[in-house]
Amino acid sequence: MSKFIDRPRYTCALGGAIGTLHALPRTISIIHGSAGCGGNINTALNAGAGYLGGGYCGGAALPSSNVVERDVVFGGENRLREQIQSTLEIVDGDLYVVVTGCMVDMIGDDTVSVAAQFANAEKPVIAIPTPSFKGNAFTGYELVLKGLIAKYIAKQAAKDPLTVNVLGIVPAQDVFWKGNLRELKRLLERLGLTVNTFFGEGETLDALKNAGNAGLNIVVSNGPGIDSAQYFEEVHGIPYIVTPFPIGALASEVFLNSVGKALGLDAAMVKRVIDEEKSIYYDYLSRIADIYNDADLQRYAIVVGDSNYAPAITRFVSDELGWIPELVMVTDTLDESCQQSVSTQFQGLNSGLTPSVRFDTNASSVKKYLREVWPRNQNDRYYDPFNPTVIIGSSFERDLSDEFGYPLIPVSFPLTGRCVMNRAYAGYSGGLSFAEDLITYLVATR
C-alpha cells in the first residue's frame, strides 16, 4: 500500500519542470493542463524557494491552455494548438517548451505531435511530457534535461576536453541553486575549464545548444542528474563523473581533485588552486574561533534535507565546525540501492562518530526519530540532556523547534522564512557563508 506523505518537501514533476525552465534564459514554459496546476505551482515555488518570484514571463504570467471539462471529454489538442500560436505571437522568447499536467496525459493528448506542427516557427517549440504521476520535482528536472538533450542540444562530433557541463543541482528545489552554480563555476574555471551550468549567472541558450561539445559532464549530486548524464552519454557520447555536493574546504578539495583526475589535469596545478583557496578560506574562518570558544558554540545537530544537502551539511558541521550530528533525516524518495549509497556518505567522519540516519519524506517523522535516538528523561537521577542543539532543515521543522526550544536554521525547500537572492553554500565561499549563517543564528540574541 502506498504511503501517505504529510506536507511534501517538493513540488510535483510539473513543478520541477517549470522551476527548471524558469532558470533558463528567455525560455517560455507553456503549461498544457488545468488552471489550478499553474496557480498552485506558482504559489509553491514562489514561497518555498525563498521567494523566487515570477521573473520574465513566469509565475502567474505563465502561458497555460487552462483545459476545462469540455477539453477533457473531447481532447485538448486543439486548445493546446491555439495556446502555442497565441504564445508565439504575444510572448517574446527564444525557446518555447510545452510541459504537461496529469489530466492531459491521462486523456491521451499527443502534445509532442502538436508541438511538432510548429517546426517552421521562427523560434523552436518542443514538448516534454511532465505528468506529475511520474514523480516529484527531481523527476521533472530529469525529464526537462532529457528532453533538451534529445530535442535541443545539437550533436557535435568534436569534443573539447577542457569544456564541462555541470548537472545535478535542481533550480528552485535547491533554493540556493544560482549562487551554488556560480561558486562551482568559479572553482572549475580556476582549473582552466570552460564551464556550462545552464541555469546559473550569465548563461545563454547558445551555450546550452552547443553543450554537446563538452568533454565531461560533472554530476554534483547523489541522485538528480545521474539519469540525465547517462542519457547525455548515450545521445552525445559525453562521459560523466558523479561527485557529492561540496560545502567547505574539505569537500571542495575532494571535488576539485575528482574533476582534475577525471580530466587528466596537471596535479600540481590542481594542488596550487586548492592551496590558494584554502589559504583564503581559513583566513576568514579563523575570525569565528574566539566567539566559538568563548561562548562554547559547539552543538548537537539535527539535519533534515534531501540526498544532496543532508550528507554535505552533516560533514561540514561535523568535520569543520566540530559539532555532533546526532540525527539525520533524508527526505528524498529513494529506492533501497540509492539509500545504501547515500548512507555510506555519513560514515568516516573525522570525529569518528556516526549519526543515526533515517530516510523518510514525512515532515512529522523527525520528532519520532528524535525520541528513538535520544529517549525522554524517565526521572533518571543522572540524565544527559540533548542540549544545546540546533535543527538545520526547512520551514517544516518550525513546529519541532518551537516544541523543544531548539534554534531552527532553515536552508532547504520549502524555505518560507528567508528571502534568498545570490546566497550560496557550495564550495569554499559557500562554506564561509554557511558558517556565518550558523554562528549568526546562535549569537543573534546575545
Image (tube, rainbow, N blue to C red):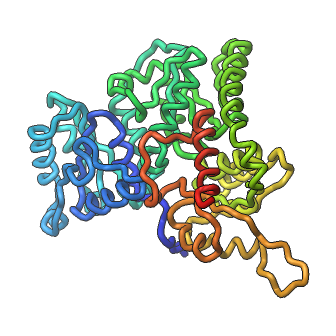
Taking the image as shown, residue 301 lies to the left or right of residue 85, namely right
Q: Quadrant of the N terminus?
A: bottom right
Instruction: Name above or below for residue 371 compared with residue 158.
Output: below
Residue 334 visible in the displayed image: no
Q: What is the quadrant of residue 206 in the picture?
A: top left
Name, please, the residue furthest toward the right: 381
Q: Which of the pair 311/381 is nearer the observer?
A: 381
Rendering coords of residue 38 (x, y %): 27, 58
Residue in view at x 72 percent, y 21 percent? 275
Residue at 35 percent of width and 51 percent of height: 130
- Figure quadrant of the C terminus: bottom right
Q: What's the residue at 59%, 61% (across, down)?
A: 445
Query: Does the image show residue 242?
Result: yes
The foreground one among 73 and 140 is: 140
Residue 99 x/y as whole percent: 29, 49
Image coordinates of residue 35 in percent, x first then y, are 21, 62
